[in-house]
Image (cartoon, rainbow, N blue to C red):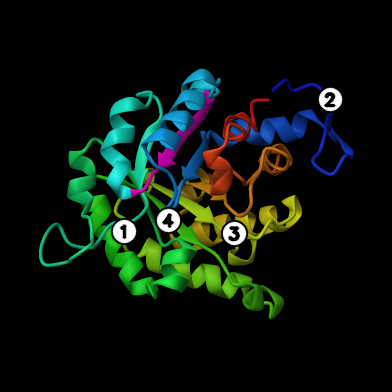
Amino acid sequence: MECQNQDVDCSDGKRIKLDSSHDSRMAASGRQFFVGGNWKMNGNTTSIDGIISFLTDGSLSGDQTEVVVAPPAIYLQYVRQKLLASVAVAAQNCYKEAKGAFTGENSAEMIKDVGCEWVILGHSERRHKFGETDELIGEKIAHALKAGLKVIACIGELLSERENGKTTEVVFKQSKAIAENVSDWNDVVIAYEPVWAIGTGKTATPDQAQEVHHQLRDWLSQNVSPDVSAKTRIIYGGSVTAANAHELALQPDIDGFLVGGASLKPDFVKIVQARSS
């Protein structure tokens, strides 16, 4: 992006002025933009071939943006073998043990064995639909990192918690459980996903998202280290679309996105391009 003053169109039809100071803040961070696509429990070989096709044909911003997709576990090896080597593949979950009598679970070691590099842990659907606690998520993160996987660690508040002014209380508590189990922050991306915005069509405004991202970065500085705070990528998730991604990507503390339903559609390429466009 040029560092000249310019106008850009936003998702609400308004035009905003970009100035050189905003571009400088983004460049100065040194944090590579990161976009993950969480396919959740969707897809079959036919539809996955279609996703691979538009990812292969689209311009994914080269070195400017790190792209990771997370198919259902049964398709991890299929996707890894067919997808561009430049796009990493993540599992959507893993257990805290390497092996054993854990019917239905997958280990970090198995995920690595089929060529994948990342795992999503702590997603709100795991927390609230499957009852995963901060403690369990922390144990999973510790084991995944030890096994050599990189982690997309998810945090976020419920609507009732936001309405009661407890957003920071909730996300700081979740962040503490993560931080206590991280051995190398170079292998961790934090995904802030307000639960009230996931799959609802509601999205935090750029200002709302930026505020929490900035607070999280301050928390990291005070509770881990200023260096970790400066280097760790904090990405946003919650009904991200091609229409709102560019405006969100302009915020200085938003380093990318974790995308749900939109990652199954060709518009995902536009989301990947949100900062470079």
Q: Give the residue at the far bottom of this rendering.
A: 164
Q: Position of residue 188 (x, y in %)?
A: 39, 48
Q: Position of residue 37 (x, y in %)?
A: 49, 42
Q: Which residue is mark 2?
A: 5
Disc 3: CA contacts within 10 A as few (<14), some (14-19) or many (>=20): some
Disc 4: CA contacts within 10 A as few (<14), some (14-19) or many (>=20): many
What's the amino acid at mark 4?
Answer: Ala
Q: Which residue is mark 4?
A: 153
Disc 2: CA contacts within 10 A as few (<14), some (14-19) or many (>=20): few
Q: Position of residue 158 (x, y in %)?
A: 59, 72
Quadrant, the C terminus: top right
130 or 176: nearer the viewer: 130
Quadrant, the N terminus: top right
Q: Secondary structure at mark 4?
A: strand
What's the amino acid at mark 3?
Answer: Ile
Q: Residue at x 10, y 63 (%)?
A: 100
The numbered mark, 2 or 4, whose residue comes first in the sequence reads 2
Q: Secondary structure at mark 2?
A: loop
Q: Residue at x 61, y 35 (%)?
A: 271
The numbered mark, 4 or 1, whose residue comes first in the sequence reads 1
Q: Are marks 4 and 1 in contact (CB under 8 Å)?
A: yes
Q: Which residue is mark 1?
A: 141
How far is disc 4 from disc 3 in space, using C-alphas?
16 Å
Q: Which residues are magenta?
A: 64-72
Q: Is residue 75 left or right of residue 30?
A: left
How far is disc 1 from disc 2 in space, using C-alphas?
42 Å
Q: Secondary structure at mark 3?
A: loop
Query: In the image, is residue 68 part of the stretch drawn in magenta?
Result: yes
Q: Secondary structure at mark 1?
A: helix
Query: In the image, is residue 53 part of the stretch drawn in magenta?
Result: no
Q: Which residue is mark 3?
A: 198
195 or 227: nearer the viewer: 195
